[in-house]
Image (spheres, rainbow, N blue to C red):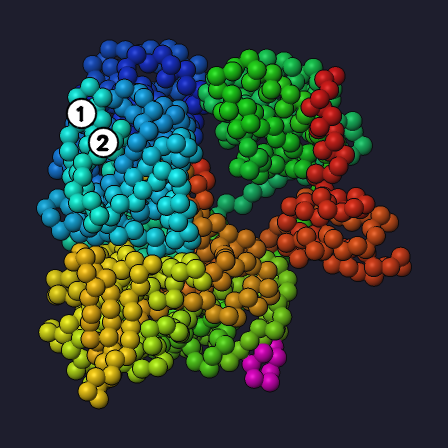
Amino acid sequence: MDKVEGKAGEFNVTLIKKPRYIEEEKCTGCGACVEFCPILIQDQYNQNLSLNKAIHVYFSQAIPLVTYIDPEHCLFLRDRKCTICTGVCNKNAIDLFQKPERLEIEVGSIILAPGFEIFDPKLRNDYGYGKIQNVVTSLDYERILCSTGPYEGELRRLSDGKHPHKIAWIQCVGSRQSIPGGNSYCSSVCCAYTQKQVIVTKDHDAKAECTIFHNDVRSFGKDFERFYQRTENLPGVRFIRSYVTLGKEIPGTKNVTLRYATNEDGVKEEEFDLVVLSVGLTPPDEVKDLAEKFNIELTSQGFCKTNSVNAIETTRQGIFVSGAFQGPVDIPESIVTASGADALCSQLLAYRRGEMAIKREYPGERDVSKEEPRVGVFVCHCGANIGRVVNVPSVVKYASGLKHVVHAQEALFACATDTAKKIAETIQEKGLNRVVVAACTPRTHEPLFRDTLREGGINPYYFEMANIREHCSWVHAREKEIATRKAKDIVRMSVARAARLKPLQELNLPVDKRALVVGGGVAGMTSALSLAHQGFEVFLIEKRSELGGMARKLYSTLEGLDVQAYVNDLIRNAFQHPSVHVMTDATITTASGYVGNFATTIKTGEMIKEVRHGIAVIATGAEEYKPTEYLYGQDERVLTQIELGERIAKGEERVTHSQSVVMIQCVGCRNEERNYCSRVCCGHSIKNALKLKEINSGMDIYLLYRDMRTYGFAEDYYREAANKNVKFIRYEAEDKPRVEMVEEGGERRLKVTVTDFVLGAKLEIDADLLVLSAAVVPPATNTELSRLFKVSLNPDGFFQEAHVKLRPVDFAAEGVFLCGMAHYPKNLSEAISEAYGASGRAVTILSRDSVTASGAVSEVHEKDCVSCGICLSVCTCGAIEFHDTPQGKKAWVNPVLCEGDGLCTAKCPTGAIQLKHFTDDDLIAQIDAAVRED
Amino acid sequence: MGQFAEQFDKGSVDSHAGDVMVVGGGISGVQASLDLASSGFKVYLVDKAPAIGGKMAQLDKTFPTNDCSI
């Protein structure tokens, strides 16, 4: 990055493209140069735990899969000494004289997503890291566990290559520390990734003894509490709540001892084979330079300074931020803010959408239905991924002898743009009407090759993929001969199936450009306004008579935002925007349709209206649990945190004049009935405690907690509360605080009894106010809504996203999105980010003129249908219904709704329902070929 | 940096125009780029490393599904 000029809408960025010393278009990633390069260097990708060459591919699945020369180590670039690589490259792709290139790029807006670095424990010599070989960071350990890591997926330790058996993890290394060199914030992700590493370790070695030394266990994410329990319940796993110091490295075995203390046993020293430091996240070094060039401000911690409500906005207009540059966040948040940044760019640049897009043109489709099958087979080396194990030329030779095969050839990299083009040309030149690519997985590459067939002028469903990588070379890396035989078997099966494939037609369906947003809280309103700003018409419906949702009951955030003013502004904007149609007191009575074409009927009072829309966003929020415990509802001094917030805002005397306040965390959750953490309550109680201390610094505040889960920057407020003498007392789930009403001398005292683990004694507190941090619970109406829109709920009653990590605001049902507390409890700014994220994802559909429905869908042969209805009951997409025919009721598949999962075909007792592209005939031909060579 | 590697070709400047530049090719940058491209915008994705993927590409598996990270 050289310089950035201009302003939002017209930035001019000058970049310097560092030389790779490789011509990217020519390199096929074959790896020959890597093999012959004489210089070994440490492999950065593997955390310097293994060696690579000075010329190398960054990692085996790298994109782009082309080599790169490390100029610091290359003999030629250092001393003009060696040119072996140029000699072995038969593509002439190596250019040792390549120079840096200067690029000028004009863009309308910019998204900064530079990510994070891990905390370096070497800087302070934490736990001897860097000196003691068997002390590694969690990222080192990640590489050690990985099949592409230094030990090819075998769990080994550095000092002697032995399998470590007794492993310790130390949490919060570099995080939650207000000492020099440490980071005061909580890194948010380490508790979770450590639990993952423990589970994966136990998969490697079921007898491994795993010990986690921790402070609070912060399992605040969706389903994280269950994951924590799953880890804790594994045999041989100990969670020990203790600070840890390094004992020593034992000479000879090189084992490491750690000293820790428990309430039961006092100080102990214990020996471990391997110690993993759960290091936190820090901003990358280069962000200071980045901030200067982009003229944006950073926080004192070195992260991007963002708008206090919209964490995606930087201090400069037109420049947005996503991912861990905002602060320490997990993968789903990084995705949410990415889609959110997309929405904000799209709001800014809506006027020029599509102007620079490139439209694809395809040749006309040749009718080959009358021709004999003419199969072309392309066997891919996948760089060295397949070629290193499977003898590709021998597979090609074998394939060319198979029935129907008229052409077979190898490809170094079948998915490379130039190879795909050559395949398309070969289809035309040789008159191929079926294509088999023997390469990797259809999950990622089938769409690409189907496109290649369209380029070649034949129906894309004449394509068949033989997976000889995941199913062969990767799993049989050490058995080359057998792997080659298996690759031939797989290819033979694919050719047999390909010969029977039929052309299928895809359906192009127009997209209704309007959106429906269900729920008028902050998430719903933000999402609706964002869609409107991106140029789409929105129906915003709310079941209550007013917009605002849960935020109407909130007065401030931990960071000091005036929530009421913010919400009122948002409500005004929602009502005023000409493209947002607000409906209150509204309930949905029916919903039908599919992506691009939904029809939903909405009842407001006596009026019933049908709304047509292309997408829907579910933003129905959540509610506060009404406690049944701790005398709530029986004594007016017992409140919830939300009620306390309202009373503080109103300056109620009972609250402001209280001398002793007790807060109890985890009321109504982290229990059997609600086995999840409500995520927001720890921050919420800290906020209220600080407010109370502001009113009366002498007030005694006792906060009874199980784990303080003030993740991210909220940790600083937790520390502030502790410094202001808020007393934090930890309790165990099995030994909850007891609350009693005690009558004494005509006075009714509220007595709270709790075990203090530090003092080892029962503590009795007289409370003027008892504040319950009540769980966040999903609204009961979610069940009905999930049925109407055919989206699922998780076991706790929150909506279930398509993928917890990678598709956090999408539903599995296409065209329906979610945001805010409908997904899971979250704070205001997280809900706002998600709202932008959902609208960003929604516009990827709304901005299209049509959506394509797959041709590989189920079809009913009516004469065989016995109307049993089993297919209807197993279909998860609601695609099958009965319709009347002269022969009675028969099942009918709506091709638009069918997702092609084949559940119905597996269940149909008469074989009347068949999944096109996966018919019984296709599959039987494939299976026959597996067992019969001819 | 190798002593012969630093010379800079000052003569040529390549000019390009697009809608959005995304700086950083980790999971967040890649997602933002894909969403933008699917919404009708031309994107330049810039990364300092020789391949995109960022930190997530270094992870063995991801929590809580324990799916492969790549």
Q: Residue furthest bottom?
A: A746
Which of A215/A923 is in front? A215
Q: Is residue A339 visible?
A: no
For the record, the magenta segment spans A603-609
Determine the secondary structure under disc 2.
Answer: strand
Residue at mark 1: chain:
A
Please report, as a chain letter, where disc 2 is located: A
Horizontally, residue A379 falls left or right of residue B36, namely right
Pointer 2 and pointer 1: residues touching (CB < 8 Å)? Answer: yes
Q: CA distance from mark 2 to mark 1?
A: 9 Å
Task: Give the residue type at disc 2.
Answer: Glu
The answer to whether residue A603 of the structure is visible from this angle is yes
- Our reading of the magenta stretch's main secondary structure is strand
| Picture coordinates of residue A730, whole percent (x, y) | 24, 59
Q: Which mark is residue A271?
A: 2
Q: Amino acid at mark 1?
A: Ile
Disc 1 crowd, CA 10 A, few/some/many (<14, 14-19, 20+): few
Does residue A605 belong to the magenta stretch? yes
